[in-house]
Amino acid sequence: MSPISAIVRKEIRSYFVSPIAYVVASVFLLLIGLLSFLAVATASNRSLQMLRGQGSLPDLNLNEIVFRPVFANMAVILLLVVPMLTMRLFAEEKKLKTMELLVTSPVTITDIVVGKFFAAFTVFAGMLALTAVGPLALAPFAQFQWEPLLTAYLGVLLMGGLFLSAGLLASGVTENQIIAVILSFGGLLLFWLFGWAGQVFADSAFGKVLSYLSPLEHFEHMVKGLVTTSDVVYFTAGIVFMLFLTHRVIESQRWR
């Protein structure tokens, strides 16, 4: 077994030994379920209104009126939920004084950082996979396109990976889990607001740079069913950069 695999298994086991994974997954699925119910109820009401007016069942685009709003609002849920998945990854090690044992064990810091990231990403991907129950349950009763839906799921995975890597960095700079959550949420919210600032300076090169740095701009493209190289490169580069910063932080603490 490779060092990364061993760390991934250890961290996943830690998630499910403690109540963290269960609580975070419950909150995540509850919010997604509520959003999905409201979107379906809205589509149903609109269909009934058009039926009364036209006398026949309308041809509604479920991808447009049901799934797209759910995925668009899912970004806000990630902003709130993902920091809770990463808050303990390094902070708990420092609090329990096991960080010294970890960094002096026969594994590299790269193995540690990558292993912890993939453990959190695996848990997140499992949570996200459970949300597919909704579209699968709706499929026998309604027609919709799966391709835009899968593209939106890819966008959520990439956005979640970026948020997880940022949360891992926040957990690496402190031993207090609450502070890690606040740092993670604050940093992600700052990048979130780059899109708004980019609209304010839309006519300048500075505004274009801010818009590109905003994860929301790239996420919205995928929610609409569009996959571009620039969007994939943005998320991939962001994840790698955050993991690199985490590596540097942990390495600097190793020699204190």
Image (tube, grey):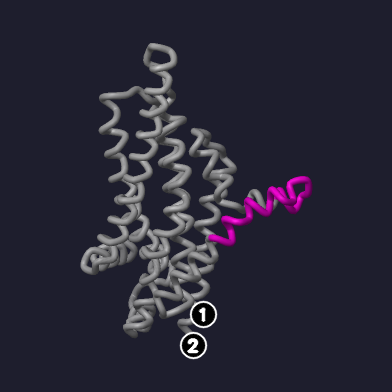
Residue at the front extreme, as displayed: 52
Residue 254 placement, left or right of 96: right
Image: magenta residue range? 189-208
Q: What whole-number distance in Å separates the C-alpha atoms at marks 2 and 1?
A: 7 Å
Question: Residue 7 appears in which quarter of the rendering?
Answer: bottom left
Element carrying mark 1: helix
Residue 12 locus on image (x, y percent) = 27, 62
Q: For the stretch drawn in magenta, what is the main secondary structure? A: helix
Residue at the disc numbered 1: 252
Identity of the residue drawn at 49% across and 33% down: 225
Which is more toward the observer, 101 or 72? 72
Q: Amino acid at mark 1?
A: Ser
Q: Is residue 32 left or right of residue 190?
A: left
Magenta stretch containing residue 203, yes or no?
yes
Residue 100 visible somewhere in the drawing: yes
Measured as percent of width and height from the top left, residue 200 is found at 72, 51
Label 2: how many residues lie within 10 Å, few (<14), some (14-19) or many (20+)?
Answer: few
Q: Amino acid at mark 2?
A: Arg
Q: Are marks 2 and 1 in contact (CB under 8 Å)?
A: yes
Mark carried by residue 44: none
* Left or right, residue 229 beside residue 203: left
Q: Nearer the viewer, residue 171 or 24?
A: 24
Which image quarter holds the N terminus? bottom left
Q: Residue furthest top?
A: 55
Q: Residue 198: x, y in percent?
A: 68, 51
The answer to whether residue 1 is seen in the rendering is no
Residue 123 part of the magenta segment: no
Q: Which residue is the site of mark 2?
A: 256
Instruction: Give the SS element for disc 2.
Output: loop
Can you say whether 106 is above or below 191 in the image? below
Residue under the image location 45 percent in, 75 percent down: 179
